[in-house]
Amino acid sequence: MIVGFVAAIAGMLLYAVASVAQGLAASRASGAAVVTHPAYLVGLGCDGLAWVASLVALRALPLFVVQSLLAGSLAVTVLLATVVLRVSPRGRDWLAIAVVTAGLTGVALSSGSEASTAPPSWYAGSVVALVVVTLVASAALWRRGHPLALGALAGVGFSGLALAARAVQAPSGEGLAMVLGVAAQPVAWALVASGVAGAVMYARGLELGSLGPVTAVMWVVEVLLPGVVGVAVLGDGVRGGWAPVALAGVALAVGGCVALALSPAQEAVGP
């Protein structure tokens, strides 16, 4: 469990660094030059490392814990933006950071263990179906979808990644045999596809709408959907007697993240 917490916190910090680095690149370059700027490339690298860290955490902790901790990257982003991008947070932003911190503390303290039993036999197929529906909906809404709908789809996409991570079975063997064993599982491909769908729809939502509302909707979906499935279907545990604390912690974390997503600091960071 300790490894899971370390990985989740590392993912949270890396996602925040990635956002600020990409925002810095956007402030120093324009057009196609942004994606070749060194700061943007650093941000992409941090995104990749954060993704790996989140997968490690998802194999060790309940889904609601991991997703809530990752959402805390918004608070870290605001703090980093004050130093790197010279953004001045409002008083309500500092209050939101305190609320997020309190919520995440409650979530961490109330965490039980990840379910030790295997997911139901129908779980992997259901995750693959969810990803397929997400891809179809993304294609249908690409041209004229409302930005908030695109943000919600991004949240579903990233939720699919988290849910798929719990369905991938570790094959026997080592090296190439293990890689081939993972690649033979449809849910492993669904994991990759859902992550790509989430990233693409988030970028599209930002293209058509404002950063704050799109990000807020995405994180609300990304925290609540996997969290509910984890507890209701996968048997993720909450410490005995700590269910009210867990619920309050998630509510505070989500509420604080919504407030931070609407912060001028987030608008300055950009996608």
Image (cartoon, rainbow, N blue to C red):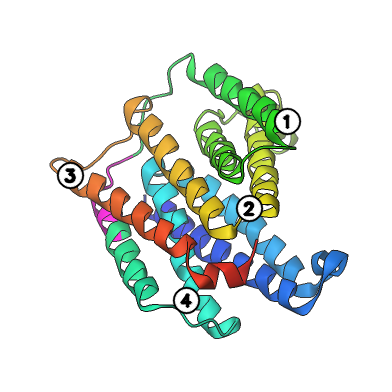
**Precedes in sequence: disc 4 or disc 2:** 4
The residue labelled by disc 3 is: 244
Q: Are marks 1 and 3 in contact (CB under 8 Å)?
A: no
Crowding at dot 1, Cα within 10 Å, few <14 / some 14-19 / many 20+, comes out as few
Relative to residue 142, is residue 99 depicted above or below? below
Q: Is residue 163 left or right of residue 239?
A: right
Residue drawn where x is 86% and y is 64% of the image: 32
Crowding at dot 2, Cα within 10 Å, few <14 / some 14-19 / many 20+, comes out as some
Q: Whole-Å distance between the Cαs marked 2 and 3?
A: 35 Å
The amino acid pointed to by label 4 is Leu
The residue labelled by disc 1 is: 139
| Main secondary-structure element of the magenta-colored stretch | helix
**Precedes in sequence: disc 1 or disc 2:** 1
Q: Which residues are magenta?
A: 105-113
The residue labelled by disc 2 is: 209
Crowding at dot 4, Cα within 10 Å, few <14 / some 14-19 / many 20+, comes out as many
The amino acid pointed to by label 1 is Ala
Nearest to the eye among marks 4 and 2: give it.
Answer: 2
User: Which percent across, then down, holds residue 187?
Assistant: 62, 26
